Amino acid sequence: MVFLSFKVNAISLTDQLIHFFKKEYPIKKDHIHVIIRTQLKKNIYCKKPFFSVPSNFRYLGLVDVLLTCNQRHYYLQVELQTKGEYIVAKRKILRGTKIQISDLKMLIGRLDTLPKNTYFKKEDVIDKVSLRDIFPLQPITSFMIRPFWLVKVNQKVIIIIHEENFTISSTAISLNNGAENDKIRVKTKNGQILTGIINKNKEVIVSA
């Protein structure tokens, strides 16, 4: 297991962990509560502990922490409770709906109890398309939405090929779905397969 390592200074072990997580926690720094689930000997005292967490640390829920104290190692299971804002549906959002800001609202609550990959910023959800019905006050996760496809598979598209000294415009058939700024593969009239970037006008820009 790969660990990421940090040094901190504090008074009690719990305070040291809170200081450590506040320093590294990317969403909210004011509402963090730490519970040490591993039983420790009462005589353990660290003036300058050294904490390590797994490289795939999710910042929420149960966390495995390696504590190095006076050249000895202790493995701790720590519960990290956090409170902050997250996104929910303001009203029922039907499957296939392009989500608008009016469909969303922010709630404040425990982030560590939310489903995996819940969104915390409205801009990450706006203009996406719902893959299923989303009910009022339901947290919105990455499994519920997809990008809005500007180009769909088997769609006829305009391709613009930029050569060194000139530009060629033609038509082709898309081979996959794509949103704005996505890479997409297209098939030209003569059967050539090209890869380009979709712009806001649904054109595929190919750089030679």
Image (cartoon, grey):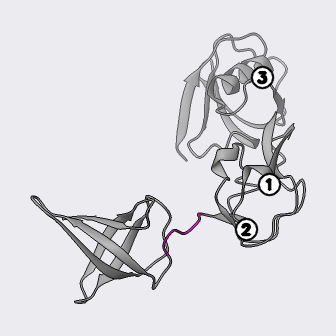
> Where is residue 26 shown, x and y percent of the image?
64, 33
Relative height, residue 141 to residue 154 (above, below): above
The earlier-in-sequence mark between 3 and 2 is: 3
- Bounds of the magenta span? 147-151
Task: Tell me where residue 159 appears, x and y as whole percent.
Answer: 31, 72
Residue that mark 1 sits on:
103
- Indicate the secondary structure of the residue bearing disc 2: loop
Q: Give how far apart the Cα atoms at labels 3 and 2 are.
A: 35 Å
In the picture, the disc for residue 30 is 3
Q: Nearer the viewer, residue 21 or 207?
A: 207
Relative placement, left or right, of 97 versus 181 is right
Q: Amino acid at mark 2?
A: Thr
Residue 97: give its label.
2
What percent of the width, then of the height, locates residue 188? 28, 84
> Residue 37 appears in which quarter of the rendering?
top right
For the point 82% across and 53% down, the residue is: 139
Q: How many marks?
A: 3
Disc 2 from disc 1: Cα separation: 10 Å
Q: Is residue 138 above or below residue 35?
A: below
Q: Quadrant of the C terminus?
A: bottom left
